[in-house]
Amino acid sequence: MTWIRVPACIDPTGDIREPLVDFTSSRRDRGAQSIRGVIVKFMAEYKHRLNGSATENSGDLASMLEVFSKWAPAAGYTIEMFVERVDATGGYILVETNEPDSVLEFAAQFAPWNDSLIVPVVPVEQAVPALEKAAEWRRQAGAPAG
């Protein structure tokens, strides 16, 4: 498989820089896809598909639990937290990886039973300085204060 090369990017200072991800060779050729070695956290929210009758939903959940009993986390990510909602309608998984496709693979394994929403997240101690910097930029750009 051959991937297209993403053109260089121009950052906000006008400098030309290489793209974060190099798609010039297949995953098999280059090993695990890495975003310049950056570890990213993803929060996955999953909701069980409970759209059938009580009997159908019970059978679907039993089927999912049977498959889940044979599942083990892939080598491409680390699970930091895996919790089920107390109303038994779904749960949350916090994973850390530099291979986003491993998170996609995990979600796809359980797609017949779950709807998933997966977003990249950062710890709040990293988020607050970035949010403050953005607010300062908006102030300097003349954006309304409120």
Image (tube, helix red, strand yellow):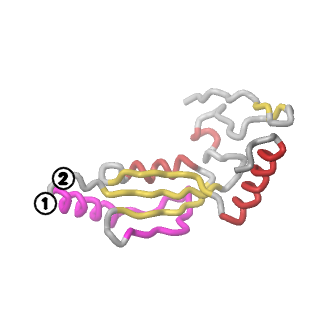
111 magenta-colored: no
Give residue 19's position: percent from left, percent from top. Answer: 73, 36
Vertical side of 72 occupied by 117: above or below: above
The one nearer the camera, 9 or 104, is 9
SS at mark 1 in the image: helix
Describe residue 56's horizontal placement relative to residue 81 as left or right: left
**Residue 85 image-quadrant placement:** bottom left
Q: Residue at x 45, y 63 (%)?
A: 92
Q: Which residues are magenta?
A: 56-85
Count of all numbered marks drawn on residues in the image = 2
**Residue 43, position in %: x, y?**
53, 58
Q: Decide which of 33, 53 is in the foreground and name it.
A: 53
Q: Amino acid at mark 2?
A: Gly
Q: Position of residue 121 (x, y in %)?
A: 60, 56
Extreme bottom residue here? 86
User: Which quadrant holds residue 54?
Assistant: bottom left
Where is residue 87 shown, x and y percent of the image? Answer: 32, 69
The residue depicted at 55 percent of the width and 68 percent of the height is 80
Give the residue displayed 68% in from the left and 29% down from the top.
Answer: 6
Name the amino acid, label 1.
Answer: Thr
Vertical position of residue 2 compared to residue 33: above or below = above
The residue that disc 1 covers is 55
Q: Is disc 2 in contact with disc 1, using a CB cutoff of under 8 Å?
A: yes
Residue 72 part of the magenta-drawn span = yes
Which residue is labeled 2 in the image?
52
